[in-house]
Image (cartoon, grey):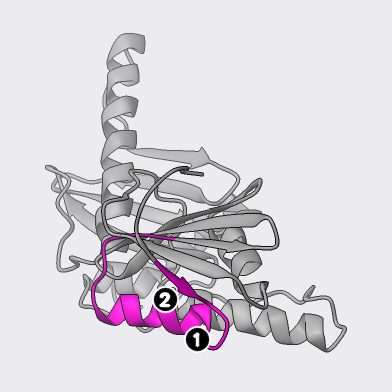
Amino acid sequence: MPDNINGFKGAVAGLSLTDVIQLKGHNKYTGAITVEYDRRKGVIYFVDGEIIHAEQGSETGDQAIYEIIKWPGGTFNIHPELTSNVCTIHYRTDYLLLEALRRLDEENAGTGGNQVSPGPSVTPRRTMSKIAARLQEINSITYAVLLDKQGVPLQDVSIEAVALASKGMFLAKTGNQLGDLMGLGELKAAAVHTCNYHLLMYDSKQHYLSIAVKPGCDLDAVEGEIRSALIPGK
C-alpha cells in the first residue's frame, strides 16, 4: 500500500465508490484511487479505464475490490501519477462491480454471500479473435487471447488482452529456455498456478494462446473443454 502520496481528495459518502469507478472507466483513466474508511485503507489501480490490480489489507485482486466496495463511506484520493506493473485482476470492470453489489446484497439479506458466482459475461466488450471468443464461452475461463510470436495480441487491444499476452509470452520464453537447458526442445504447452488464477499457454507454429482460468478449477477438465471448443466445425 503506497504512503505519503498526493492527489485529489474527495468524500465517498453521497457519491458511491462504484460511481467513481464507473466515471474513471468512462474517462479511460490510468492511475490509482486510494480509499480510507475507519482506519482501513485500500488502493485500486487502473489502466485505460480498466481495473488491473487492487490491495486491501492482506487481500489483493478481485477480493480486495469486493472488500473495499463493502465499506459504507470514507474518503478517496485520485492519483494519476501512481501506477502498478502488477496485474491480479482479469475480470472486466463492469463484472467486478456487479459481483461486488451482488455479494453486498446477499450479506445484507443474511445469506452470507456463499453462493457460487457466475462467470463474467461471455460477450466480449471489444473485438477479439474467434478462437478467444469461443474459449470465453467456457465458464471456467475468465479471459483468453491469441497472440503472435512477438507477443502482440491479435484483434484485441484491451488491457486484459495485453496483460494476459505478456504473461503468456513470459511463460513461453521461460519454458523454452528450460527446455533448451534440459534438452527437451521447445515448449508446446504449460500451466502456472497462483492464488488468484491459473494460466495456461499453448504454442502453435505461428501463434501462442494464453488463457486465464478461475482458481480451484480442475485443469484436466478445463483442457478437455478447450480441446472440444477448438475442434473445427463446433
Categorize mark 2 by other alpha carbons within 10 Å: few (<14), some (14-19), many (20+): many
Q: Residue at 62% across / 68% down in the picture?
A: 66
Determine the residue positioned at 39% across, 47% down: 5
Q: Position of residue 178 (x, y in %)?
A: 34, 18
Q: Is residue 84 visible?
A: yes
Image: magenta residue range? 9-33
The part of the image, by quadrant, that contains residue 19 is: bottom left
Image vertical order of residue 220 relative to residue 138, above or below: above
Mark 2: secondary structure: helix
Residue marked by disc 1: 15
> Amino acid type of disc 1?
Leu
Q: Is residue 172 above or below residue 163?
A: above
Task: Tell me the distance, in whole angstroms, between the alpha carbons under discs 2 and 1.
Answer: 11 Å
Q: Observer-nearest residue: 229 or 166?
A: 166
Left or right for 173, reference 144: left
**In magenta stretch: residue 103:** no
- The percent position of residue 8, horizontal first and vertical second, equals 35, 65
Residue under the point 67% across and 78% down: 72
